[in-house]
Image (cartoon, grey):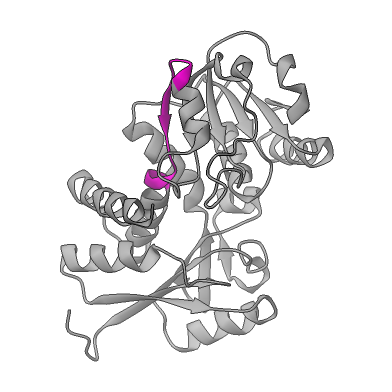
Amino acid sequence: MEINGRTRICGLLGYPVAHTLSPLIHNTLAEELGQNLVYVPFPVKPDKIGEAVKGACALDIAGLNVTVPHKSAVLPWLKEIDPLAEKVGAVNTLVRCPGGYRGYNTDLTGLQRAMESDGIDLKGEKVILLGAGGAARAAAFLCAHAGVSEVWLLNRTSERARQLAEEVSTGFGRSCIHALTLAEYRQIPAGSYLAIQGTSVGLYPDTEAAVICEAGLYEKIHTGYDLIYRPFDTRFMQLVREQGGRAYNGLKMLAYQAIEAYELWNGIKVSRETAERIIQKLKEETKTDE
């Protein structure tokens, strides 16, 4: 594309950012849609996030994504926060508004859109959620927001699991999350569950690891979503399939959270066909890494 005086700039605030696939997604979207926009990563150290937001505003940066470690730390520097993002206590997308930026959390809506594309309607589902950190937190709030019937939240420490369950209950006025430690997974009642793997266990290079390996858990899972996308096929996914379930990685979530950010920045709707081309491009990129 030609960069000129009318080129709009969007970018990513994080630390580190060298590994990010976001430029691939957003610059491909701009090219496909014929928009004069360029997306670049900005490495911002934790103590500089406020200065970065003010500087981006002064430079008229059109939109920003926010990743680790800034998703919650950026909140005091925003002019407005979307109500759903405020409940979660974290944002990943900043959209220009008068005097600054409005924060959104497209991790939630991106995961929901990814699941819907695979035929999963969260409303009324019974869910097993592994982890209580950043990615799992977004999934927990999504489950309550989308109307699941119950969530069995398994985490290494019970304290963090209980805290997340309480925050979700307070935010949505319904107690749908049961907090357990990983070792207590046998307390989950018999049934057919959607499982969401939200820990970092299984990330490259520890690709043969899973947070729980016992078949007794996976016998209850009809569909498993691993929010990891590198490696493309995780041990968690393999364990789900070994017990007859369907399994997906986090690649579509990555794509759709970015697509929703792009839609917010530009006031447009990205077609399903374009989204599928983005997902295919990401598949090719991540499989090359293996």
Q: Please provide percent x and percent y for residue 230.
A: 45, 50
Instruction: Look at the picture and state if 74 lies above or below 248.
Output: below
Residue 266 in view of the camera: no
Q: Residue at x 50, y 43 (%)?
A: 227
With 32 as the anchor, is 119 left or right in this view?
right
Instruction: Look at the picture and state if 261 lies above or below 95.
Output: above
| Most foreground residue, 230 or 94 | 230
The N terminus: image quadrant: bottom left
| Most foreground residue, 109 or 227 | 227
Q: Residue at x 41, y 51 (%)?
A: 254
Furthest residue in direction bottom, as rendered: 5
With 24 as the anchor, is 187 left or right in this view?
right
| Residue 251 covered by magenta stretch | yes
* Magenta-highlighted residues: 242-253
Toward which corner of the image does residue 64 lie, by quadrant? bottom left
Furthest residue in direction top, as rendered: 190
Toward which corner of the image does residue 250 lie, by quadrant? top left
Count every numbered label the image shows and give the total.
0
Q: Please provide percent x and percent y for residue 82.
A: 54, 55
| Residue 130 covered by magenta stretch | no
With 111 as the anchor, is 215 left or right in this view?
right
| Most foreground residue, 188 or 284 | 284
Q: Residue at x 31, y 57 (%)?
A: 285
With 91 as the anchor, is 112 left or right in this view?
left
Q: Residue at x 74, y 38 (%)?
A: 170
Q: Please provide percent x and percent y for residue 54.
A: 57, 84
Residue 197 in view of the camera: yes
